[in-house]
Image (cartoon, grey):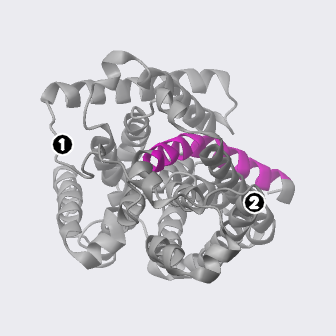
Amino acid sequence: MGTLISSTQGLLFVVFLMVAFSLWLQKYKVFKSLGPVLTVVVIGIILSNTHIVPISHELYDSISTYCVQAGISICLLSMNVTELKKLNKEPVIALVSAIASVCLIAIVLGIIFAPKITEGWKVAGMFVGTYTGGTPNLTAIATGVDCSRETLAAANAADYVVSTPLMVAMFAAPAFFKASKKWNKLWPYSFKPEELDDADSEPLMADKKWAIKDIAWLLTIGFGVAFFTTMIAQRIFPDTFWKAGRLLMVTTVSICLAQLKPIKKLRGNLDLGLFISLCFLSTIGFAVDLQQFIGSAFLMTLYVFFMLIGCTVLHFLICRLFKIKYEYVLLSMVGCIVDGPTASLTAAGGNWKSLINVGLIMGVIAGACGNYVGIFVAYAVKAICGL
């Protein structure tokens, strides 16, 4: 059966329309809870399964080849290592605990689930990526381990089904922690109200000012890093590892470049990186066969469910042992599972004004670490399971 739109020009129009429409829909509560990533993937599934666009096309491979690494690089240009000095011992312990808990539980559950899931060892690394830095890391790990489009779509769906209720609970947690006498008796370590006030804090989610030269340089840097790291990785790494090696190189080079003063002045990197990532993810939905998708997503959903419960419990136990203030414990978990801006919003929602920037920094650091630990866990599960 033919498709309504099959030309490259027509498909490019559809891709950009999907991204723009998904971002526009974020003003509505139901779509804001879904997020632009899942929204664009679901739209893609609908379009391909109703034969409006083809399931496969050379354009999809081109977008995957040229856009993903550049998008990752552009996002990482926000990593400012000088911000690390704002973190004292407690938030560092909390962040290390959150990342280590995700990795450990992912490996243990990966041994159980990976042999039963298509590309299971890759999925293990992908979920570590997304729960140490958000969806961009899931996509990054997927490209690094050469994951199929069907598996990536199923992983995104499983992530949404399980992590959304958890995130709702985490947004509600500050009010619960404050009001619960039993909780404060169980966890007596917290900030005093006056320590959480910060009269100098800037308004969150303020309007951004961009210049076309910022976008031009960000695109130049992003695609430049992607080009040079790909060229080098193909020469120094074996065929079975060069894509993973390239991802590690993209991460490292981008973080190093982000410390340069001229690059620190560039604006709009996170938004531009998200836009490029959404262009790629829009093609993921196109390749989904619904019958295969539903079967894969079920096992992945179980994996994610046990993984999130396990790493949350382990993280809280470790932090309780080290007597970490619960504000740090919660923000480190949100920073890992979602991202820095969401951790900042959690702090703002709890009226923890002095911790808004701390939450943001935690998320940025977790995102930078996610590519490294995700690749490590993927290949660790592969080796242990003999896959």
Q: Residue at x 25, y 52 (%)?
A: 205
**Is the residue 301 above or below the residue 284 in the image?**
below
Of tags 1 and 2, the one toward the viewer is: 2
Per the rendered image, the range of residues in magenta is 358-383
Q: Which residue is mark 2?
A: 318
The crowding category of the residue bearing disc 1, from other C-alpha atoms within 10 Å (few below 14, some 14 to 19, many at least 20), is few
x and y percentages locating residue 67 in the rendered image: 36, 41
Q: Main secondary structure of the magenta part?
A: helix
x and y percentages locating residue 82 in the rendered image: 48, 26
Q: Which residue is mark 1?
A: 208
Secondary structure under the numbered disc 2 in the rendered image: helix
**Is the residue 236 above or below the residue 32 in the image?**
above
Q: Nearer the viewer, residue 265 or 273?
A: 265
Secondary structure under the numbered disc 1 in the rendered image: loop
Residue most toward the top?
261
Q: Is residue 377 left or right of residue 27?
A: right
x and y percentages locating residue 323 in the rendered image: 72, 57
**Is the residue 386 above or below the residue 3 in the image?**
above
> Do the CB atoms of the residues marked 1 and 2 lie less than 8 Å apart?
no
x and y percentages locating residue 222 in the rendered image: 36, 30
Q: Is residue 254 left or right of residue 94?
A: left
CA distance separating discs 1 and 2: 39 Å
